[in-house]
Image: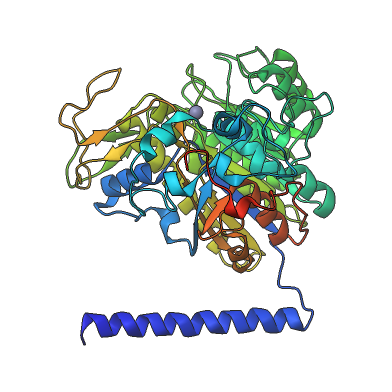
Amino acid sequence: MKKRTVFKQTLSIMFIMWMMLCLAVFAVEAKGIQPKAAKYIILIIGDGMNIEHEIAASRYLYGNDFELSFHKLPYQANVATWDVTTYEHWCGKGSYNPNAIKPKCGYDPAIGGKKPYPLGPELPGAKEYHIAKATDSASAATAWATGYKTDDGNIAWLPGDPDNGSLKTIAEWLRELKGYAIGVVSTVPFSHATPAAHVSHNKHRNNYHAISEEILKEIKPDVVIGAGYPANSSCSDTKSSAYISKGAYDAICADGDYLVVTRTTGVDGGIAILQAAQQAAASGKKLFGLFGGSGGHFESLVPHDLPDTPLVTQATRENPTFAEATLAALKVLSKDPDGFFLIAEQGDIDWANHGNDFRRMIGTMKDLHDGVQGVIDFVNQPDDDMDWSNTLLIVHSDHSNSYMRNQVKLIAGELPVQNGPPYTYPEGEVTYSSTNHTNELTRMYAMGANIHKFMKYEGKWYPGTRILDNTQIFHMMMEAAGVPMESPLKLEPRSRGWHWPRD
Ligand SMILES: [Zn+2]
């Protein structure tokens, strides 16, 4: 059979399947029977990752593009990630009005593109535009954790830092409305911007001690696993680090609700956290895992330059991998009969990209890839309540970083020639144009309960495209959980015909 005929047949089969899905959904909704709510929500963040990093890691591991674990998830979209600071950079100080938002002030598809490169063309001037101004992790996480746009550095707090600006997060909403257990996992400090924006509130992301105290003494999530470990500390010898106060450390060690496990010299951190999770799950306790090294993160995985035989190893076994930490969280959270919300972040993809460190980036991407596969395998286990009819998995990146471009297609196991730090690539296999975040569109991948409801969000902020805004992810998750909320943000009525000042 000719290739084209097969292609056509596949297309028509796909169309018929899609029609059947639509009819089934319509029939269910017409009868007033609600499709199952997402009882288990797992949000995985690759911090500072964009599609070129995804492709680079996929090529290193498999020799092909788009072979990572999350590339096979059925729902895929592109997301605009701008925050209020970026918006006001383009449209003027004080121009952001939540009741009359002009989306193009934050991201203009006519300049930046309707799709991220290489899914779409690289438009002239796009590079300068993307590099000029971008969100930070605090305001980006606040967007999907609360449904509000805010300015740089804010942790679940309104822009402009008003005194009463604390915003309730999706973890708090789902705990209150649905009784869900809540958990955060990060390979960088648990009090760092991305995890923090789900389980604390602060005007400044760098107030790590206050944030650590709010998380561990007030919000008290069912699971917290992350870096920030003060060297040579333990519950019998607590200390502070930049990321946890001694008061917070003392409080969690004295808290009978928690089982605490910390990094220990010569002890396998992956086994330790999974054994502790087993024990916590059996005894109905919460779990706090404190790991990481002097750099404030789980030492990143290391890829080796071995053409045709990709190999990524751990720098130390004293930290869990991202997959081990995430599975430990799932073990504990899945004991809650009401359901759970988990946010798990591979946070040092971003740190690698700030350093233009390709090798470290590959190691961190492999860590993320394994973590997502671990989650998929966990949900696929038979004989429990969890399956894809009641579980929603989202994999997303908070923002792009570094404007990296793969200039040469490397084979599996092959790494570019890399000198530094500061890192340079004399053979030109890859190029970097920034050591900072960029305003490029990021990718979102999803599978499971209620993803058929996601499509209607596409292009609402950007007519004529399929771009999502990052605040919509809050609403997509809340709707999937069966508790939809109206957006606090209103688009300017005339924003359809509105143009960025350049034209
Ligand atoms: Zn960053």
Q: Quadrant of residue 56?
A: top left
Against 497, is 403 above or below?
above
Against 269, is 10 above or below?
below
Question: Foreground: 407 or 264?
Answer: 407
- Which percent across, then down, holds residue 331? 63, 49
Question: Foreground: 52 or 293?
Answer: 52
- Which percent across, then down, holds residue 167? 78, 36
The image quadrant where one finds the N terminus is bottom left
Tell whether 342 sits left or right of 268: right
Q: Quadrant of residue 255?
A: top right
> What sort of colour scheme is used for the picture?
rainbow
- Which percent across, then down, holds residue 161? 75, 24
Tell whether 257 sits left or right of 81: right
User: Is residue 70 in view?
Assistant: yes
* Residue at the image position 63 percent from the left and 42 percent from the top: 277
* Residue at the image position 55 percent from the left and 24 percent from the top: 263
* Residue at the image position 43 percent from the left and 35 percent from the top: 129
* Residue at the image position 22 percent from the left and 47 percent from the top: 412
Tell whether 65 sits left or right of 208: left
Against 467, is 48 above or below?
above
Outermost residue, front side = 503
Question: Foreground: 454 or 288?
Answer: 454
- Which percent across, then down, holds residue 310? 25, 44
